[in-house]
Amino acid sequence: MLLGRVIGQVVPCVVTPGLEGVPMLLVQPLDKTLKPKGKALVAADATRMAGPGELVSYEGGREAALALDKTFVPVDHAIIAIVDGVSIT
Amino acid sequence: MILGRVIGEIHGTIKHPFYANKKLLVIEKTSPAGAPTGDYLIAADAIGAGADERVLVLDEGNGARQVFDSKDAPVRSVVVGIIDDVVNDGT
């Protein structure tokens, strides 16, 4: 998993069956010091509670789809957790 | 599997139910000699690793789900070992 910041929302008008109603958020990947790193990506929101500006943790790959209610769906990134704090020692 | 060092933890109340009672560690990837590569990842803890420990991280979904004895957990990265030493013969 990696850290990301929600920077926006994607509103699809037509989606593949199984993805109806799944929130799609624009996520900016962050490095360990919470600075933006790399290009923004679109992630399905498995928590259904993440909003713009929030720090989240997202999973990539096949495991992303497993976080959703319908697990056999074409999703490659999913928000798994809303992060309250990161303690780096 | 990859070599890393535990540099912190993340906390949150809203998360996927699978992670409800799991510790999520921030792992800095390292070279075999222990030097940070600059990259990091967040992995679930399966063995009780703590801050500043060198660890072995599995970054593959099927193996990770096997560790947690689950068929459908959304988990890919898991800490599976604590490293005492890496002997690098340099060959």
Image (spheres, coloured by chain):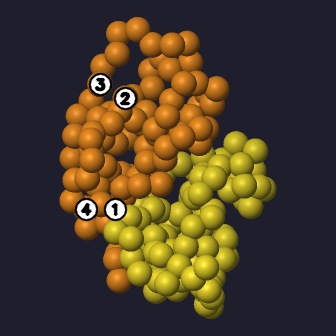
Chain colours: A orange, B yellow
Q: Chain of mark 1?
A: A
Contact? badges 2 and 3 (CB < 8 Å): yes
- Residue B54 placement, left or right of A88: right
Image x and y of residue B65, in percent: 71, 52
Q: Amino acid at mark 3?
A: Val
Q: Chain of mark 2?
A: A
Q: Is residue A2 above or below residue A65?
A: below
Q: Assign a secondary structure to mark 3.
A: strand
Contact? badges 3 and 1 (CB < 8 Å): no
Sequence-earlier tag: 1 or 2: 2
Q: Assign a secondary structure to mark 1.
A: loop
**Residue, disc 2:** A24
Image x and y of residue A56, in percent: 36, 51
Q: Is residue B36 above or below residue A9?
A: below
Say which of marks 1 and 2 sits in front: 2
Report, in whole angstroms, how far the alpha carbon at label 2 lies from the one at label 4. 22 Å
> Looking at the image, which residue sits at the far front?
B91
Query: Residue drawn 47% across and 62% down?
Result: B42
* Labels 2 and 3 share a subunit: yes
Say which of marks 1 and 4 sits in front: 4
Report, in whole angstroms, how far the alpha carbon at label 1 lies from the one at label 2. 21 Å
Query: Residue drawn 45% across and 13% down?
Result: A15
Image x and y of residue A66, in percent: 61, 38
* Labels 1 and 4 share a subunit: yes
**Residue, disc 4:** A34
Q: Amino acid at mark 2?
A: Met
Say which of marks 2 and 4 sits in front: 4
Say which of marks 4 and 3 sits in front: 4
